[in-house]
Image (spheres, grey):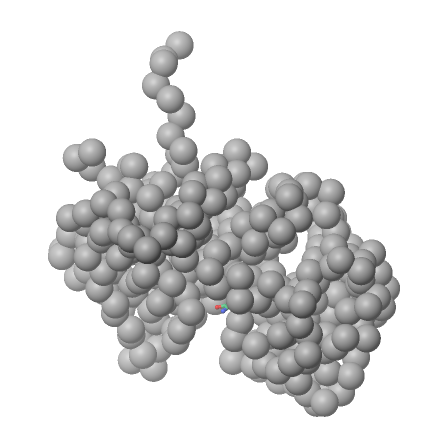
Amino acid sequence: MSDTPRPVFPHRHLLGIEGLSALDLTALLDLADEQVEVSRQVEKKKSTLRGRTQINLFFEPSTRTQSSFEIAGKRLGADVMNMSVASSSVKKGETLVDTAATLNAMRPDLIIVRHHAAGAVHLLAQKVDCSVVNAGDGAHEHPTQALLDALTIRRNKGGIEGLTVAICGDIVHSRVARSNMLLLATLGARVRLVAPSTLLPPGIEGLGFETFTDMRRGLDGADIVMMLRLQRERMNGSFVPSTKEYFRFYGLDQEKLSWAKPDALVMHPGPMNRGVEISSEVADGAQSLIREQVEMGVAVRMAVLEALASHLPNR
Ligand code: ASP
């Protein structure tokens, strides 16, 4: 038997939560806890990625995720380059492969990719020599969002196992929901999906997730209420009658929140549509973790970059 210690994270890329073990996830969350401390210091700079090049390749607009990855890379000492590619100028498949080959020739060490097509990040990862992180691919996965949500929950509730988490809203179009469902189930939470039937993925009941079309029943006894944005850019056709009606039945206001446990906490990945899926009162209220999620986002991304850096050559 070899004495070589198991690497903190034994994967070269982070393409999704799918396929990761509870051990992998816990290792990243533990590492992220350390990065929270680093980020709260006056001197925030580490040297883990000194001399390394990180490219943030965003084919879809992003405010918080892109800036979060940029800050995370810089705190670890990397040279970070932001490349925002307007989706209209991208012609799918071939262009993506060409882009990958061009970037690869510049010898980056890490590429962070957001793309409007599910699976595009996996394809790109096959074409480059460096580590790749999925920053959101279509309605497929957004692994660092699920990790930052888990870190926020763990720090506020002391653990994840046994908690009841209600994920509410536009589940069918949400990569955040998908990554969270996988992660929370792996770490032993009870995951409920609460949405109008038009926004629930077909056949989801068979996968072990409880589904509810009624908010009162879905929120009853929930420890965490995770709200999702209506992903209009991914809808073709009409999924909800009107935003006013949607808010009436599915928007989280103080009254609906009172149906969850008294100490329930509220989350939202952002960007929020106030008055559509959540009221301002709840978003800015005492039970909201929404700002803390943003802080945890930087810590989680630092942890992911640091974990992947241990696989980079010449170390
Ligand atoms: N920011 C998250 C995402 O990129 C959630 C959202 O856009 O609603 O998927």
In the rendered structure, the answer to whether residue 36 lies left or right of residue 75 reads right
Q: Can residue 145 be seen in this view?
A: yes
Q: Quadrant of the C terminus?
A: top left
Q: Quadrant of the N terminus?
A: top left
Q: Residue 265, how many percent across, how many down?
A: 69, 60
> In the visual, does 296 lie left or right of 60?
right
Residue positioned most to the front: 42
- Image coordinates for residue 62, horizontal then vertical, percent: 40, 73
Q: Where is residue 176 in the image (x, y as percent from the top left)?
A: 55, 62
Question: Which residue occupies 17% across, 35% down?
Answer: 314
Q: Nearer the viewer, residue 259 or 123?
A: 259
In the image, is residue 160 above or below residue 8?
below
Q: Which residue lies furthest to the top in this view?
A: 1
Note whether 13 is above or below 22 in the view shown: below
| Whether residue 266 is situated above or below residue 51 in the rendered picture | below
Q: In this view, does 18 lie above or below 172?
A: above
Seen in the image, is 268 located left or right of residue 144? right
For image coordinates 62% across by 51% down, the residue present is 156
Residue placed most toward the observer, 86 or 27:
27
Residue 134, located in which quarter of the rendered image? bottom left
Can residue 122 be seen at all in this image of the molecule? no
**Which residue is drawn at the image coordinates 47% and 45% (left, top)?**
33
Q: Residue at x 57, y 77 (%)?
A: 272
